[in-house]
Image (cartoon, rainbow, N blue to C red):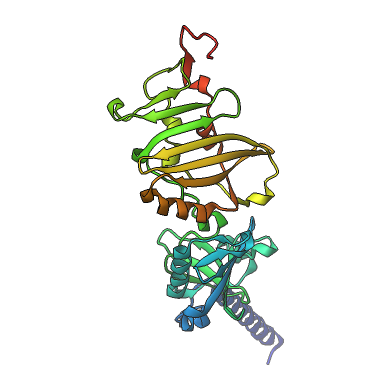
Amino acid sequence: MSGALNRRRQALLALAAAALLLVAGIAFTLLQSEPTAFRIPPQTLTPRLVNAPGTVGEITVTTAESNFRLRRTLEGWALASHDGYEADSELAERLLAAIIALEPLGERTRLASGHERLSLGDPEEGGSATHIIIRDNNDRELANLLIGNRRQDGHVYVRRTSEAQSWLLRGYLPEFSDATNWMQLEFLSLGRSVIREACILPEDGTGYCLQHRPLSGDAFDLVQPEGWNLVSPGAGDGVATVLARLRFQQILPAQELRGPHIAEHRVTTASGLEVTLFIHDVNGQYWARITAVAHSDSARPAAIALNDRTDGWAFALSDLAIDRLIRPLDQIAVAATNNPKGN
């Protein structure tokens, strides 16, 4: 064989080898980042949870911003990480059912760079996933998942924490990654129509009472103190009806309050339920302790239920809520001409 022919054969072999390596590299990349037809997706990523859903005793959720833990109790679910505050048991059951129902559709990336693109990076390592661990009553792990982006079609990216392989799953997950989602912080929603009187002791200035009188339509009248008139009909309505629907921001054991009691807001309903918010200022954040009193037999169940939920706790108020709850009298009324000092 001539030298030229031999060199040509060697060149062809080298080209063939290079082409083979290129094809192999492309195939490897596709297998790492895209779903493949060579592996049938499993029926579930959480077989132990699917097989024993009734044994769940604990849920831990970690994000880049927070970490909290829920425990099942005889009464339902509680936030063990928040001093045992009552958690939304219905949300817990919906979440567990939703995770069980997640259906793997196909593999996605195994690459760390791809994980973060899908929000599947471990939050304990600086990633943006939501990490959920589900354990049974004996502290055995039933599921350990990193939850990533939700697509417009409703599908969600997930991977098991112990594996690099990620998956695209079909199914709906409720909002569960923020502890406040579990606290049911809208429990104080009396409804506007039942509020008959609201008395306010503001942080500064004169205390006052607003009252709904049937002959006045929907508006609240200023009934105390004498010598003051509302600046316009209904000027006190926003103050009087705050408890028609109020959402708190956070919770704190009442014994940990370190700020002074600076104001009060008390409401009485048509049924005889009296609800008082004792407001504290803790370094510029306002918190409320809540007490309910029943002035009739019909109001007793509501008072007991409210006290059961709020006893021993303080609840953070938003700036908008505090502005309405303890608005000074001179912002809604003016002194009558024969009472220039508002006395």
The answer to which of 206 and 83 lies nearer the viewer is 206
Which image quarter: residue 205? top right
Judged from this view, the residue extending furthest toward the top is: 338
Q: Position of residue 56 (x, y in %)?
A: 52, 76
Q: Position of residue 128 (x, y in %)?
A: 61, 59
Q: Residue at x 51, y 78 (%)?
A: 45
Q: Is residue 77 left or right of residue 22?
A: left
In the image, residue 98 sits, relative to residue 184, either above or below, namely below
The answer to which of 280 and 140 lies nearer the viewer is 280
Judged from this view, the residue extending furthest toward the bottom is: 1
Report if residue 38 is visible in the image.
Answer: no
Q: Give the position of the C terminus as an image quadrant.
A: top right
Q: Give the position of the N terminus as an image quadrant.
A: bottom right
In the image, residue 308 sits, relative to residue 223, either above or below, namely below
Which image quarter: residue 29? bottom right
Q: Residue at x 41, y 62 (%)?
A: 154
Q: Position of residue 15 (x, y in %)?
A: 63, 79
Q: How many marks?
A: 0
Q: Residue at x 45, y 40 (%)?
A: 243
Report if residue 275 is visible in the image.
Answer: yes
In the image, residue 318 sits, relative to residue 331, either above or below, namely below
The answer to which of 250 and 329 lies nearer the viewer is 329
Q: Position of residue 87 (x, y in %)?
A: 52, 61
Q: Residue at x 44, y 81 (%)?
A: 43
